[in-house]
Amino acid sequence: MKCPHCAYSNPEGVKFCLNCGHEIVDRDENYSIFYLFAHRVDKIPRNERSVEPKFRNIFSRVFRQHSEMEAERLFIVGTGLTTPKIEEVVNTWPKPWLFARVFLIALIAYLGLYLGVSLFENINFIPGLIVVGAFAVPFTTLIFFWEMNAPQNIAIYKIVYVVFIGGILSLLLALVFYDILGNNTNVIVIGICEELAKVIAVIYFVRNLKYRYILNGLLLGAAIGAGFAAFETAGYALRALLSGSFHMLYSTILWRSIFAPGGHVAWAALTGAAVCIVQGDKKFQWSMLIKPKFLGVFLLVVFMHALWDSPILGILPAGHTILTVILWILVFSMIRIGLKEIADKKLELTYCKEKPTPS
């Protein structure tokens, strides 16, 4: 099955090209109105295509059938052999789908563990219930960010490494800051301590110029936030269990999972992207953190974190839901900025190649 976009020969049954990700259309559909329109759009230079968010298109592949080979191809990106050159990166909006499959798998595993505890009353299932329940939604959200990383220059093993090491590093740093500030429980202090801890963890990973793109910072920040959120949820779930209430255990996992996408994962993703914005192609320096482009994002994230923990938000109906929606508008705006950065770099490289050398 030859791809109509890049002429790559794919195995039978593949819905999307394993080389470029373009949808493979059957011969009988080649002359449909949709195909002709898509063919015309494909002739438009990529640097002239819109990278504005079209939410219907972004999630258009979630409910389609995908082969195992397509998933395997996603998991091998980011290595020295599979990372595309910046000229080959598509700067239009990615269409993630794997995150939905990951969530479904985690949900099935959690339901199995739940039945083991509630129906069969086997306490051996409790550790698995807490771990899977704590990681399911943060890791699913992280996979979404991983699929949205258009440069495809970060391997999945690196992401898992950042989740665990970055997550525990940021938690320990937050505890150090709490001790320095006398364990102050003010929501502003909590927001500053936890977000600053995650920023330092992000800097540790993005200081390498290999991960200099805004979308890289967004992904690595999300990985650290996912680890932070999952470990924190597991701790709260254990506290609820030790209080002697299985109802509190289930409730803690449920509500923290529902609002996990609007919490630590997205907060750390935004600050991670802001670090890459101020760093650019230069070696990281601490003075970069006082630049308005970083400080503005960081203070906004601290404010949203403090508002999230504030009792004021509880007065508003669906307060956390409203805050989550606002946060994800900011996330998609940052993704748009990241895609524009790639488009600009591609144009710059094209100009440098075409620019005549002085004789």
Image (tube, grey):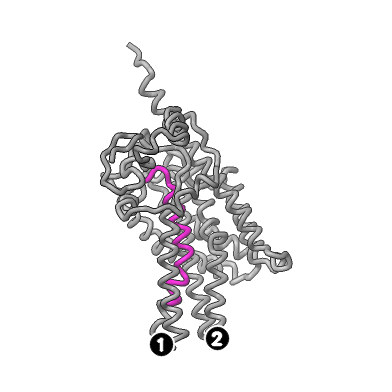
Q: Give the percent coordinates (x, y) of residue 282.
A: 43, 39
Q: Please determine whether, in this image, residue 178 is positioned above or below residue 54.
A: below
Quarter of the image for the C terminus: give it. top left
Residue shown at 60% from the left, 62% from the top: 191
**Farthest-out residue, front:** 28
Three-letter amino acid code of the residue under disc 1: Asn
Q: What numbered label is drawn on residue 122?
A: 1
* Label 1: element kind: loop
Q: Could you classify mark 1 by the number of other residues whose Cα lies within 10 Å: few (under 14), some (14-19), or many (20 or more)?
A: few
Three-letter amino acid code of the residue under disc 2: Ser
In the shown orientation, is residue 252 left or right of residue 201? right
**Residue at image mark 2:** 245
* Label 2: element kind: loop
Q: Give the percent coordinates (x, y) of residue 347.
A: 44, 28
Residue shown at 48% from the left, 64% from the top: 137
In the shown orientation, is residue 112 left or right of residue 331? left
Quarter of the image for the N terminus: give it. top left
Q: CA distance from mark 1 to mark 2?
A: 15 Å
Q: What numbered label is drawn on residue 278?
A: none
Residue shown at 40% from the left, 82% from the top: 125
Q: Please determine whether, in this image, residue 32 is positioned above or below residue 335.
A: above
Quadrant of the image occupied by residue 108: bottom left
Number of residue marks: 2
Q: Give the percent coordinates (x, y) of residue 328.
A: 58, 52
Q: Nearer the viewer, residue 78 or 115?
A: 115
Q: Is residue 249 visible?
A: yes
**What's the magenta region?**
129-152
In primary-sequence order, the first of circles 1 and 2 is: 1
